[in-house]
Image (cartoon, grey):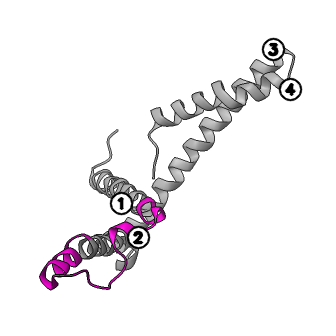
Amino acid sequence: MALPLPLIINLVSSLMSGPINKLLDAHIKDAELRKKLQAELELKLTDHLGKSLELEQAIVLAEIRSEHWLSYSWRPILMLVLMGFLLLVGLVLPLADLLAGRTLPFNPRWQVLPPQFWEFLSIGVGGYIGGRSLEKIAGKVLSAPLRK
């Protein structure tokens, strides 16, 4: 999932004012050297996170431009499978239990789904939404005439 620039700057600032600053204070007694290292580390962290963002965008653009249907369809397929599973567990099984008049011996149920499943689902939804947003933006950018 791509991070917006203000979030990257906020993340770097919080790292620099928190644990990294404490490490620099503990191990470097020269105030001028500490400030120089802190500024350099902040610049490097921001640059690294920015490059990571660019690489993520390049991956999405490569998927969009691919001629293979699976390359540009894997996110919607994954989300449809996950939503189908959630419909089964959250709607179909309770309705089947209600119609049968007893709890059917089918697992998994909501109660037994591990926390990792919900984490995976939330990351998947976030990645899907972010990826779709980038796809739409890239489609507009690629189809727009170049301005001088």
- Please tell me which residue is depicted at 59% across the width and 33% down the height of the picture: 12
- Disc 1, SS: helix
Q: Quadrant of residue 62?
A: bottom left
List x then y, in percent, for residue 85: 30, 75
- Please tell me which residue is depicted at 23% across the width and 78% down the height of the picture: 93
Q: Is residue 11 left or right of residue 16?
A: left
Between circles 1 and 4, the one closer to the viewer is: 4
Are the residues flagged by discs 4 and 3 in contact, CB closer than 8 Å? no
Task: Give the Cα distance between marks 3 and 2.
Answer: 56 Å
Task: Give the Cα distance between marks 1 and 2.
Answer: 25 Å
Mark 3 highlights which residue? 32
Q: Earlier in the sequence, mark 3 or mark 2?
A: 3
Mark 4 highlights which residue? 27
Between circles 3 and 2, the one closer to the viewer is: 2
105, above or below 121, in the image: below
Q: Earlier in the sequence, mark 1 or mark 3?
A: 3
Question: How many other residues sit within 10 Å of disc 4, few (<14), some (14-19) or many (≥20)?
Answer: few
Amino acid at the residue labelled 2: Val
